[in-house]
């Protein structure tokens, strides 16, 4: 009996020891318990209790943290999981005043977690200020780039306009130095998204156009080689082109809204063949839409452009029917058939749109197609 009691006590002690320590829960929901031994370059290193190895997670891969014997920090993390972001920021600030002396890296971690709370809470002006400071420290750091704010204040909130002013000030400071081109592009992309969230579509399109202008190399940074050909300086980094593979479809969408159809077609058409199939749907649809809108805007009309637009729109629908763009692609294909004076084909496209996507809630293309079928406006 005494021996069994000893085993029971030992089991409780072991269980208690396992339950203690630090814990990281990553963005996949996987928890890891052990001891966080460092936080450098925005990367947490945890010495796991059971795996017998170190586990690393960058701060953008972390959903929540728990640090043994640091209740003030843990309270802030709990408030984040409860989506009480203003209270979480206050809790992080409070925790920063009582950081354990034996873990100096906690000061940086606290700052970064507080920044993430500001981002999630839409405190965009404060978030942009913090992010710019991080970018200034290392503009090429991949984690810092990934931490760019994506949640904005509600439309009409002055915090959004304040954030735009911060971005404009930094862009003016960077100027046109080719070495800061990538940094400037990231600022312009954030500004574009902010302006779109503010309902400033025209200004958002202007930001998109500014991004495309970054692609043109500055003449003063070109040199002539011995044979008279233009050569780049040895220390100059080539400016990356705006391509769909780099996640720049949002920029190109803004150019479509601005009526810059030629720019979109010029950038997308030559690159489609090099894209893998799983990245093709969005760029293909955007190209087809730009071709259709250019056909509508141009005088005289180019029948070959109309046919290319129609073929690409049907390619989107037939090959990528599950994509978000498929309903609009089929609707625009019906418009192309109408332009080709093929009312029967246009009606069939609208009927198929209603049949295939009619079950989707609040689909504007289905509703528009149904209205046209009811009124016979495809004739």
Image (cartoon, rainbow, N blue to C red):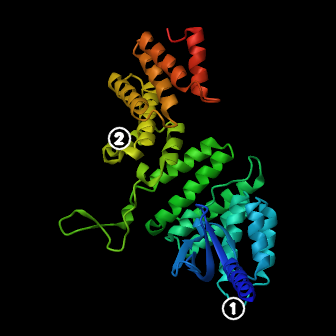
Residue at point 52%, 81% (across, down): 52
Q: Is residue 221 above or below residue 277?
A: below
Residue at point 69%, 46% (across, down): 198
Q: Is residue 343 visible?
A: yes
Residue at point 47%, 39% (across, down): 260
* Of residues 356 and 231, the one drawn nearer to the viewer in this rendering: 356
Q: Which mark is residue 102?
A: 1
- Position of 66 with respect to 47 (left or right) is right
Q: Secondary structure at mark 2?
A: helix
Q: Is residue 374 above or below residue 15?
A: above
Q: Which residue is mark 2?
A: 269
- Position of 287 with respect to 18 (left or right) is left
- Position of 62 with respect to 72 (left or right) is left
Q: Secondary structure at mark 1?
A: loop
Mark closer to the chain start, 2 or 1: 1
Furthest toward the bottom, the residue is: 102
Res 280 → quadrant: top left
């Amino acid at each position: 009996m005494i021996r069994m009691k000893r085993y029971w006590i030992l089991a409780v002690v072991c269980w208690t020891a396992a339950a203690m320590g630090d814990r990281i829960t990553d963005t996949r929901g996987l928890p890891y318990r052990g001891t966080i031994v460092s936080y450098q370059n925005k990367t947490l290193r945890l010495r796991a209790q059971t795996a017998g190895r170190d586990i690393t997670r960058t701060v953008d891969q972390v959903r929540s943290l728990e640090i043994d014997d640091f209740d003030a920090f843990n309270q802030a993390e709990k408030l984040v999981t409860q989506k009480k972001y203003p209270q979480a920021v206050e809790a992080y600030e409070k925790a920063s005043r009582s950081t354990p002396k034996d873990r100096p890296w906690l000061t940086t971690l606290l700052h970064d977690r507080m920044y993430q709370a500001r981002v999630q809470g839409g405190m965009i002006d404060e978030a942009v200020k913090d992010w710019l400071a991080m970018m200034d420290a290392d503009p090429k750091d991949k984690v810092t780039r990934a931490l760019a704010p994506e949640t904005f204040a509600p439309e009409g909130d002055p915090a959004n306009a304040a954030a735009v002013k911060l971005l404009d000030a930094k862009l003016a400071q960077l100027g046109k130095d080719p070495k800061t081109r990538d940094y400037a592009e990231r600022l312009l992309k954030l500004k574009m998204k902010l302006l779109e969230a503010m309902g400033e579509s025209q200004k958002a399109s202007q930001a998109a156009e500014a991004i495309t202008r970054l692609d043109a190399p500055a003449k003063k940074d070109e040199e002539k080689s011995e044979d008279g050909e233009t050569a780049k300086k040895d220390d100059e980094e080539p400016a990356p082109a705006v391509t769909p593979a780099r996640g720049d479809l949002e920029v190109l969408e803004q150019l479509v809204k601005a009526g810059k159809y030629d720019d979109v077609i010029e950038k997308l058409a030559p690159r489609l063949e090099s894209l893998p199939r799983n990245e093709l749907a969005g760029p293909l649809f955007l190209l087809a839409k730009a071709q259709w809108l250019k056909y509508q805007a141009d005088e005289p009309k180019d029948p070959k452009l109309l046919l290319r637009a129609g073929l690409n729109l049907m390619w989107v629908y037939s090959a990528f029917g599950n994509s978000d763009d498929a309903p609009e692609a089929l609707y625009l294909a019906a418009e192309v058939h109408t332009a080709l004076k093929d009312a029967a084909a246009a009606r069939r496209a609208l009927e198929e749109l209603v049949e295939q996507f009619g079950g989707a809630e609040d689909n504007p293309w289905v509703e528009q197609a149904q209205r046209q079928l009811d009124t016979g406006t495809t004739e």
